[in-house]
Amino acid sequence: MAQYKHDRFFKFYIQSLYKTKGNTLQNIQVRNDEDLEIDLLFIAEQEKVGWKQENLGLFDLLMQEHPTTIIEHYSSYLEETDIHKSITRKNLYWDKKQKELLEEAKSNPKSSNYQQTKKEAKQQIDNHNPFTWILTVNCSEKLLKSCNAQLAEEFGAGVYRLPPVFRMGIVIIEQLLDSPQTVWLKMLGNRETTKSAFESIKQLSPERREKNDIISACIKYCVYLRDIPADNLTTEDRDFMKTMEQIDAWYEAEINKARLEGQLKGKIESVHTIIKAKFGISALTPQITSQLEQLDSQQLDEFILKIFNLQQEEIEKCLDEIVGRKK
């Protein structure tokens, strides 16, 4: 269940990360009651190339726990009632889905190998019986003990499993170790954790699809929050909005920087062309190329105006004078 407005971000976020690895459904009604909507249900498609090309660390391991996964997100402290509701939502969903699958299995014609068909049908039905991961910013030791949650050692600190009958686990984001393996989960933590995680994500190559899509999700959510009247925002919403605004500002600065660098690169290439056209390719020496790269846009404009009145032997001296004034 969406506990706060920015659980909308959680949905943007996971759909953006996992669109190359499977099918993500959101706001699945299991009864006509908002409290009983399943936030997100993810159906992994292992043949998709995203699993090989995009490594999301611990998040990927969690999302491959089972072919069908429910993801619930709590942006504050997890309470006992939250676990009860998660169990109720999953059971209501599965009760209806199981009946549908059994009806489909009955309607299929029996093959010559009936036992094999029956075994496959049972496995297919089990693949649709979801495992639930509850992602929470924090959780008390008392609650973990009361539901007999055990540390899932293969995943490391912060990841717990409930008894198998519940098909459920809890991920406590504030307990996860700081590492490249956990950074994608930590984006769903509190304000400081999110800021720290994003500092790591923005260092990634601009070629990373998941990085660019997450930035886009952050910006979309920032726009969403801005449209909400300030009086309707909780303190938590306002804190989270500040983080989203910082991400938005960083992205805007990166776009402007790229645009300016593109303009500057274009001017340098134009100067190269002018020098080669006027004096020949040999005139564009490594020294002159290095000097040109030290100039800003305004200085390049100045040099372009002067170059038409220069002799070849005067190029370096002119560039030295322009660079010297800059210093």
Image (cartoon, grey):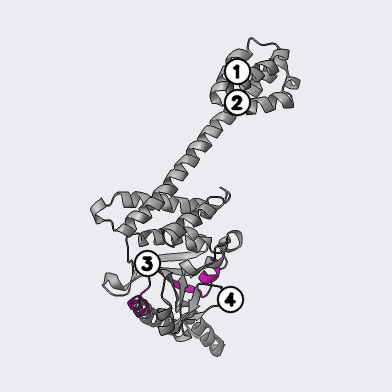
Name the side, left or right, on which 8 lies relative to 281: left
Q: What residue does disc 4 label?
A: 154
Q: Secondary structure at mark 1?
A: helix
Of all residues shown, which one is farthest toward the right? Answer: 282
Look at the image and say whether residue 92 sits in the magenta stretch. no
Instruction: Report the quarter where the C terminus lies.
Output: top right
How crowded pointer 2 is (Cα within 10 Å; few <14, some 14-19, many 20+) is rated as some
Q: CA distance from mark 3 to mark 2?
A: 51 Å
Q: Amino acid at mark 1?
A: Phe
Task: Tell me which segment is drawn in magenta.
Answer: 60-88
Q: What residue does disc 3 label?
A: 76
Q: CA distance from mark 1 to mark 2?
A: 9 Å
- Among the two numbered marks 3 and 1 on one chain, the one whose residue lies closer to the N terminus: 3
- Among the two numbered marks 3 and 2 on one chain, the one whose residue lies closer to the N terminus: 3
How crowded pointer 3 is (Cα within 10 Å; few <14, some 14-19, many 20+) is rated as some
Q: Which mark is residue 303?
A: 1
Q: What residue does disc 2 label?
A: 295
Q: Secondary structure at mark 4?
A: loop
Answer whether labels 1 and 2 touch (C-beta < 8 Å): yes
Q: Is residue 270 above or below residue 14?
A: above
Please state the horizontal and vertical placement of residue 280, each as a whole percent of the image.
Answer: 73, 18
- Among the two numbered marks 1 and 2 on one chain, the one whose residue lies closer to the N terminus: 2
Residue drawn 58% across the image and 23% down it: 326
Look at the image and say whether residue 70 sits in the magenta stretch. yes
Q: Amino acid at mark 4?
A: Glu
Residue 192: quarter of image: bottom left
Q: CA distance from mark 4 to mark 2?
A: 54 Å
Please state the horizontal and vertical placement of residue 86, each as a whole percent of the image.
Answer: 37, 76
Q: Is residue 147 visible in the rendered structure shown here? A: no
Name the side, left or right, on which 288 lies relative to 81: right
